Image (cartoon, rainbow, N blue to C red):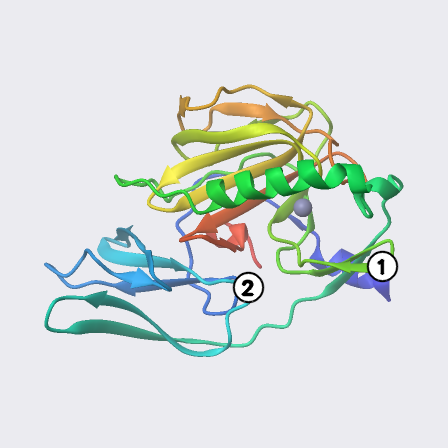
Amino acid sequence: MRIFLLILTISFLSPGQAQPRQLLVPGGVAIIGLGAGDTSGYRFMDKPVLVTEIDGKTSALIGLPLSLKPGEHSIEKRNVEQVNRKFFEVKYKEYSTQHITITDKRKVNPYASDMDRILAEKKRKQKARTHYSTGAVDVNFILPVKGIRTGSYGRRRFFNKQPRRPHSGMDIAADTGTPVRSPSAGKIIELGDFFFSGNLVYIDHGQGLISMFAHLSAIDVKLSERIEKGQVIGKVGATGRVTGPHLHWSLGLNGNWIDPALFLEIEN
Ligand SMILES: [Zn+2]
């Protein structure tokens, strides 16, 4: 039964540019058209939302946290006299469960001496995930690496039978050394060798849209470097908490990790 489920959830990624798609579920994206003259100042959960052209219409792109309760939600803009709200309805989504065996037990149950490092890295990661910069954003992403999608966003995970946080990104299996390309233009805001993520790179694409790539065998960019869409930022590897070489890609929008598949030409 488990083999059958695995086959169902593997999908081949197709290259080429895509436009983001709306999926109104926890971990999804809301796309709300904005009227002329009413395109700035909207916030979701007190974070500024990304505004860009989608199908020729100025729209707000809102990242929905995996922990969001289904039901009615809104973006809002507060003026001195009034509050403007735009509502959308979030539906329930059932995410699957995955059991993973990690041979390096220290990566599942770290030593007490690892905790200072883990906590310091957690702070750096949180800062990078919630980073915000203004300016135009190219939301028409390309695929960062060609390979087989092996782990879906949102899966509830057990490492060596112990529950851990749900999967916050997309896994793409590829050989160690395969070049990883930036899905869009941006700036490198964090990088290094981290306990769980191995060699990682954070890219700020602008307006709260952030890519994080983990488990790299090599990092080919420098901190604060500006990069083009398609530029090689590193190479696929098996560093950190992994079962084998693959690229882990997390995509943040207004501070929330969302399903990167919504920015690619693939089925969820
Ligand atoms: Zn992953």
Q: Position of residue 236 (x, y in %)?
A: 67, 29
Disc 2 marks which amino acid?
A: Leu
Which residue is the site of mark 2?
66
Name the residue rendered at 62%, 48% in the picture.
170
Q: Secondary structure at mark 2?
A: loop
Q: Measure the C-alpha gap from mark 1 to mark 2.
A: 26 Å
Amino acid bearing label 1: Ile
Q: Residue at x 59, y 34 (%)?
A: 145
Q: Residue 108, percent across and down?
A: 81, 47
Q: Which residue is mark 1?
A: 3
Q: Visible in this render: residue 264?
A: no
| Vertical order, 21 against 101 (above or below) | below
Q: Mark 1: give few (<14), some (14-19) or many (20+) Cα within 10 Å.
A: few
Q: Give the camera-side residue of 225 and 17.
A: 225
Residue 68 position in % (x across, y down): 50, 70
Compared to residue 176, the image places residue 205 above or below, namely below
Q: Count residues near mark 2 (Cα–Cα under 10 Å), then give few for <14, some for 14-19, many for 20+.
A: many
